[in-house]
Image (cartoon, rainbow, N blue to C red):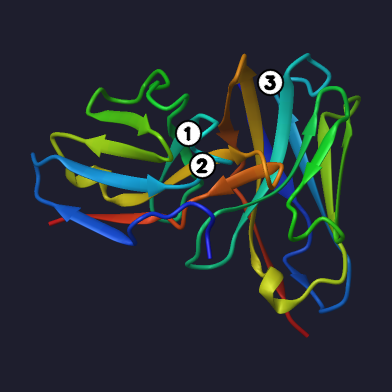
Amino acid sequence: QSVLTQPPSVSGTPGQRVTISCSGSSSNIGSNIVDWYQQLPGTAPKLLIYGNNQRPSGVPGRFSGSKSGTSASLAISGLQSEDEADYYCAAWDDRLIGWVFGGGTKLTVL
Amino acid sequence: QVTLKESGPALVKPTQTLTLTCTFSGFSLSTREMRASWIRQPPGKALEWLARIDWDDEKFYSASLKTRLTISKDTSKNQMVLTVTNVDPVDTATYFCVRQTCRGNTCYFDYWGQGILVTVSS
């Protein structure tokens, strides 16, 4: 059981916009920043969004992050087939004194 | 160019101690604000953070595993080591070595090793 809650799966068609939610509590998302990671099949995760809404260089502008209260969201616009991957949110937890991850969301591009 | 690579046994028996080494380049764990963590992923399951070590040798452990984990670093060799005692089949996972960069209040895992699959089985 992951500390942060994500939907197990989302899907969309090419060109569509999808969002992935990440729900936490006051000890993690509510008081700390959220990062998002993309994991393509058979590879290590890759940093996608940091600091709630910042994109590392090389990450397309189609990816955006937001946070409100104890929840965060990742939005992907102009969906492409290569976006098919697992997506994880992460945050520091002040009560557990450690990093916590969401259970991951599998994005399928139909 | 930052690279990290995990090494260690692919197979360990239950109750044994697992020792994993991360050899990295392109950064130093003696540089202020630099940190590194171990994160694991059981087959088909989610990521789980295990432990972190900072440039000043401060250490943090997963609350659920802290009695079984030890993290250490050797800055002269650019290596980080994780030991897991009394392993069980539920410890079967791909173990990732990850660099963490912090700027003010913002911290993130920016470089990941390729991971090493460790199977616990008799």
Q: Residue at x 66, y 70 (%)?
A: B92
Horizontal relation, residue B39 to residue B70: left or right: left
Asked if marks 2 and 1 touch (Cβ < 8 Å), the reply is yes
Helix, strand or loop for disc 2: strand
Q: Chain of mark 2?
A: A
Helix, strand or loop for disc 3: loop
Mark 2 vs 1, N-terminal side: 1
Asked if marks 3 and 2 touch (Cβ < 8 Å), the reply is no
| Quarter of the image that includes the C terminus of chain A | bottom left
Marks 3 and 2 share the same chain? no
Q: Residues within 10 Å of mark 2 (few under 14, many from 20)?
A: many
Asked if marks 1 and 3 touch (Cβ < 8 Å), the reply is no
Residue indicated by mark 2: A90
Q: Residue at x 43, y 40 (%)?
A: A70
Query: Percent from the top left, x then y, of residue B11?
Result: 75, 71
Q: CA distance from mark 3 to mark 2?
A: 25 Å
Q: CA distance from mark 2 to mark 1?
A: 6 Å
Query: Percent from the top left, x then y, of residue A64?
Result: 29, 28
Give A20 or A24, whichever is nearer the viewer: A24
Residue B26: mark = 3
Query: Percent from the top left, x then y, of residue B106?
Result: 56, 21
- Tag 1: amino acid: Val
Tell us which disc is closer to us: 3 or 2.
2
Tell me if residue A104 comes above or below residue B55 in the rendering: below
Give B72 or B58, whichever is nearer the viewer: B58
Give A72 or B53, whichever is nearer the viewer: A72
Tell me if residue A103 comes above or below residue B79 in the rendering: below
Residue indicated by mark 1: A34
Q: Chain of mark 1?
A: A
- Tag 3: amino acid: Gly
Q: Residue at x 39, y 46 (%)?
A: A22
